[in-house]
Amino acid sequence: MHGPSPRLLLAVAALAGVGCDRSPSPSSTLRDAAVPIAPSASAPKSVWQKMTALESDTGKGEILTDKNVPELWIPNVVVTGLAIHRGSVWWSDAAGVHERPFDGEARLALPGQRAELAADDDGVVFAAIQGPSRFELQTLTAGESAPRRLAAMRCSPLQLVTAKSDVIIASTCAISAVPKRGGPPRVLEPETHLDVSLTAEGDQTCYVNGDRVICRSLADRRAKPLVIDAHRAGPLLLEGQTLYWLEDTGAADVIVAGDFGRLVRWELPGGPRRVLTSMQRQAFVLLHDERALYYGNGAGSVRRVFKADGRVQTLYNVGELETPNLAIGGGYVYFSTGSAPGIHRFRLAAE
């Protein structure tokens, strides 16, 4: 029997850390839960490349850790969100939202508590905490000095992603779509779970909510959503009409040897499914470029899986049994962990 996913554990810890007056089960839906607070900084730890115990029994593939040497790019920050927008890395911490160009100096873009970040070419979107069980969805574009409010919302933010014309946000109340131009939220799902996972591209969004993956059109409200039975689905990635998901093995009662943690590729709406690889564990989010998928897993590894042949590479090991938070841009992988404050980066080496 395996425990709950790391995303769920972090969400539960965040809610419990601010004095929530009830302790829901992982499968319960939540409304009006307390606002998550960023964890306090811990003493820095050395980053090392030794394979961890969990790493030794997962599908680590080709080891490239000797080719990817990280630098401590931003020291002494405890990151709660990490994203790329127009040649800059953006992150949130207890002080606010910060920006640093790939080749420039860091600045505090917006002081004050924020939670969750998402970014695309249109701007950086974030949840600005307004009080217990209240937040505003705001956006800021590079070069602007003040954010623009998109919507005022109840409950606590869990995750958000951007689509062509909307921001999709999961809170402890619902999964909703908010127009990028601003306006009232449109509820897509009236109930949500702490371990929800979202993805969106163009005018389509997909999300894990409980034991289902649901894909729906954002442009045609009358279109029937596609519902997929997925007992162990974890983080999702939508690329055109291709949906990737990495199974969350923490949700499985029984794990079959060699057949857990499958990274699945599915052509929507009813095309073939293909397993790219297996024995992958406990990721928060899937990222991608033209050729490959990237994620940090619970073994403390930064992994790359090639879309064409499912080849797996371990790019780096943080040296702790925790899931690194990732962003990719400018030829670099940026990552942060809870055990070692700071943002590190390494340039992607040749294959």
Image (cartoon, rainbow, N blue to C red):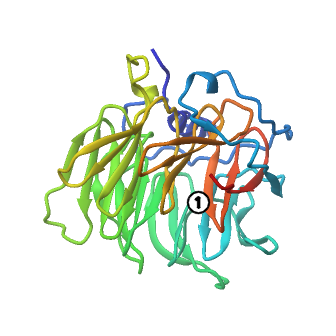
- Image point (59%, 47%), residue name: 36
Quadrant (top left, top right, bottom left, bottom right) of the N terminus: top left
Q: Is residue 152 above or below residue 115?
A: below
- Tell me: 276 left or right of 127: left
Residue 245: x %, y % from top left: 39, 44
Q: Do we see residue 25 in this rendering?
A: no
Label 1: element kind: strand
- Image point (55%, 34%), residue name: 6
- Residue annotated with mark 1: 129
Residue 86: x %, y % from top left: 61, 77
- Image point (74%, 55%), residue name: 346
Q: Is residue 1 above or below residue 214?
A: above
Instruction: Please tell me in which quadrant of the rendered image residue 203 appears.
Output: bottom left
Q: Camera-side residue: 107 or 286?
A: 286
Say which amino acid is labelled 1: Ile
Q: Camera-side residue: 161 or 104?
A: 104
Mark 1 crowd level (few <14, some 14–19, many ≥20, 10 Å Cα): many
